[in-house]
Image: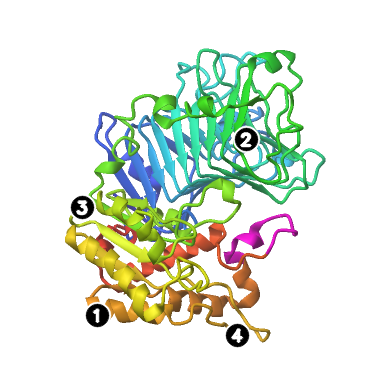
Amino acid sequence: MIVAKDGTGSFTTIQEAIDSITSTNQERITIYIKDGIYKEKLEIHKPNISLVGTHRNKVKIVYDDYAKKEFPNGENMGTFWSYSTIITGDGFYAKNITFENSAGSGSIVGQAIAAYVDADRVEFHHCSFLGSQDTLFTGPLPPKPIETSRFGGPRDEEEKRVGRSYFSHCYIEGDIDFIFGSATSVFKSCEIHSLNRNKEINGYITAASTPYEEAYGYVFFDCFLTSDAKPRSVYLGRPWRDYAKTVFLRCWIDEHIKETGWHDWDKPLARENAYYAEYNNHGPGADMDKRTPWVHILPKEEAENYKIETIFGSLQDWPTLGKLEKAGVHIFLAGDSTMEEVKADQGNKRGWGEFLDPFFIDDVLIINEARGGRSSKSFINEGHLNLILNRIMPGDYLFIQFGHNDQKAEEERATDPFTTYQEYLSVFVEGAKEKGAIPVLLTSINRRTFDEDGNFVNSLGSYPDAVRQLGDHLMVPVIDLYEKTKSLYETFGAEETKKLFAWYALTNPSNPTDDTHFSSYGAEKMAELVAEGIEELSLPLREYLIKNYV
């Protein structure tokens, strides 16, 4: 199915497409959504529905209900009727979509939920959740309210069934309790952004209400916690119910997080019964010396128990988690830190490889084997290429991008553009061909280098020319990222180009300039250029680009 506001699809609204599915359907139904802002109070109660947009910045599901809004009978809507989207169908999957509640500041309108998720085996990939107060609710509701007899929402009388949900490479923003509920939820490589309320306490990221009998609540792996709020003004979480469970592992935490980290919501029992823990977090807000004494500092052996299979159990019936390795085509990435999936312990920088997936349907699996600091020579000598060649299959792709470290002449990893550099790149190419795979060369991505007059300056010497020459000689396609990034930087200009790079995104002005590694915004732009190159070269891989499905 295709949904398009301009009438070029099967439906003009997402709800129409969902309503057209029979209530007895058990097969997976994929609905592709063309660019647009879809103002709908969306309800998804049927199982096994997939919503796939072109890009989360181009496909938005928006509504503006809020807790203080009055029903015709004069009663307030309340928190749980304020949702923009509600999902109760098991096996739901979303990719490349923004879910937004546009009601405004919680201090004015009260709670306003962007997504109400009360289902099992739910996955969100490369999605955004925008709101202010109570942005993302992961049900079920707690057994009963603390002060009243009813919660007053669409699921008030339903069975309290603990759902499981998975969020990968998502962006979630809000201020007070903006990730809350009783579900078992994993957040992997997400950006969790606290809005600036210009108050002494700018808010709380989580408010879990994990049931007593559940082993896991909210688990954050390799996430980035960001904000432009003042330092030490945001808590990692507080317990909506006494047995709340929330754990942050290997996350990068900016300085907006309070030194104590966690709040007890003035619930003495919560200090004894809630389970808040951290492991190997990094960044200016990750210092454990002043954390509240009732938070757990996980030892390595306990942290290793936090695996998706352990948290969720069997992944067999999940939309993608249990079958990613069965994707039809694999793209292996071999390169340096501009391409790699950067771990949060390295700060705020990101590689473009982790942002390539949104451009493809799920028949394609990106396997990012890029390694920071490697040249074409050291990548081979350290055995990384062999690891790829042992897994790559006929029809798969190998994307090869080196150059930044090859040009460091004083180091052992250095190569010469038209001799050893081309020789090592040829090893990648021939290795892929021997396996029946398709090699693709990429010229190096430019650094941010401008002269005093604002003119772009080449910092990569002859290495891009050497790649082009080798591509012609070996008859291998070349995506010219050097020329593409040069054009992009010149269009942006010296000042605007700063936003593409990691150092510019940091709140602490003392951080050193980094004109090589990208911010999330920059890495996403680089991935877009790669997808553009695939299209321009008419590679068979282009058939799997999402844009060709909508």
Q: Earlier in the sequence, mark 1 or mark 2?
A: 2
Q: Amino acid at mark 2?
A: Asp
Q: Earlier in the sequence, mark 2 or mark 4?
A: 2
Residue annotated with mark 4: 455
The alpha-carbon separation of the residues under discs 4 and 3 comes to 44 Å
Q: Do the CB atoms of the residues marked 1 and 2 lie less than 8 Å apart? A: no
Instruction: Say if 444 sits above or below 365 in the image.
Output: below
Residue at (64%, 83%) from the top-left corner? 451
Which of discs 1 and 2 lies nearer the camera? The answer is: 1
Q: Position of residue 415 (x, y in %)?
A: 42, 73
The part of the chain drawn in magenta is 499-512
What secondary structure is found at the residue carrying circle 2? Answer: loop
Q: Amino acid at mark 3?
A: Met
Which of discs 2 and 4 lies nearer the camera? The answer is: 4
Pick the residue in front: 514 or 423: 423
Q: Amino acid at mark 4?
A: Asn
Label ID, residue 134: 2
Q: Position of residue 195 (x, y in %)?
A: 69, 46
Which of discs 1 and 4 lies nearer the camera? The answer is: 1
Residue annotated with mark 3: 393
